[in-house]
Amino acid sequence: MNIIENIRNALGAIGSNKMRSMLTMLGIIIGVASVVLMVAIGQGAQRGVTQRIQSLGTNLLTISPGGSNQGNVRFGGGGGGGGATLKSTDATAIEQQVTGLSGVEPEMRSNEQIIAGSQNTNASVIGTVPDYVTVRNSPLQIGRFINQQDIASMDRVAVLGSQVVTTLFPSDPAPIGQSIRIGSNLFTVIGVMQSKGGTGFQNQDNVVLIPLSTMQQHVTGQSTLSSISVSVANAADMSTAQATITAVLMNAHRITDVTKEDFTVLNQADAVQTLDQVTGIFTLLLGGIAAISLFVGGIGVMNIMLVSVTERTREIGIRKAIGAKKRDILLQFLVESTALSILGGAIGILISFIGSFILGRYSIDATISIPSVILAFLFSVGVGIFFGMLPAWKAAKLRPIEALRYE
């Protein structure tokens, strides 16, 4: 019997027991759909994290107060590991002594209640400088940004994130000239930032940007900085710039021992690489957990095929009596179990595409990749062959006389 006849017989056997065949394939269907969707969700999360970090700025170095991590121990000098150790003079020193930079942006952050008329919201208030637009890759939508005159005069002017505008001015998407209150201070709105689509923790659209000098003098009353962000003009110079900035700040803070650093210079590229590794492991974990259901589905295929061998014992005996060889019987049942797995895998892939479409409607990035589809499909075929081998071998070993006598 050739392979074409075996395939025809396998499809005939599957079609004659539609309900049982569907229940047999159910484990394979669920397994394949789960693997493909879980990998898609994991890769979507990886892309989302990478895009979120990259949207914070281009070729970004972030200097934060507090000591660097040496091994698993956090060291800190005068900053006590998390103290206020950065000042505006540090940003000036970096700007003057480090070459190859496209922008230096010192900032101070504070969560405040923002009031406009009868509306109010809680937002992150950021005292910043004109370089914010360049360093943070955050263009304006309307109006103007903070300039050096605003810094020098400590003007009470504000640029709003898109979410703050929506909350405070629901009927006015361009509230230029309107007033908002931060604490006891009235600020005039001079611009609105383009939306970055941020949600949840550190939402980039839920911000109010004011001059750094105004923030330090009138809002917080402190001269220290929350961080200094630096944009490097050439990505190839990131490591050099990081080392130079570290040297400049150590000299400015009169630190000679690197274990006594009271600041941390974080390379954006390192953060992206680390998070890519973490989300990659997360994706593999999700795929591995989902793959377990494929093995469960394979056991279901094996059980049903064993039942099928028992039900068709007399048929096997007749075929052997008229000349069928062991390999013919083996191939017949192996093709049948593989056909079940292939059909189940195909249905599972179809369901995964439907699931991806549904998740996309709820703003969940689950774009299915072709490699994951191929891998899941080949895995389902392998499961069918592996778990179909035992029933096929059992059928092939039956003796014709005993098979013909079976009731």
Image: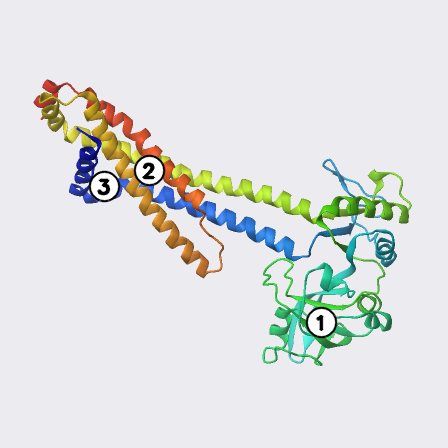
Q: If you read the primary sequence from the N terminus, does the residue marked by circle 2 or circle 1 appear first?
A: 1
**Along the viewing direction, whichever of 104 and 186 lies nearer the viewer:** 104
Which residue position holds label 1? 159
- Going from N to C along the chain, the mark reached first, 3 or 2, is 3
Given the image, on which type of amino acid does mark 1 rest?
Val
Dot label at residue 297 = 2
Q: Which residue is mark 3?
A: 21
Badge 2 density bin: few <14, some 14–19, many ≥20, Cα 10 Å: many
Give the percent coordinates (x, y) of residue 63: 77, 51
Q: Callout 3 environment at 10 Å: few (<14), some (14 to 19), or many (20+)?
A: some
Q: Quadrant of the N terminus?
A: top left
Q: Quadrant of residue 5?
A: top left
* Amino acid at pointer 3: Ser
Is label 3 in a helix, a strand or a loop? helix
Q: Is residue 84 left or right of residue 331?
A: right
Horizontal side of 176 relative to 42 (left or right) equals right
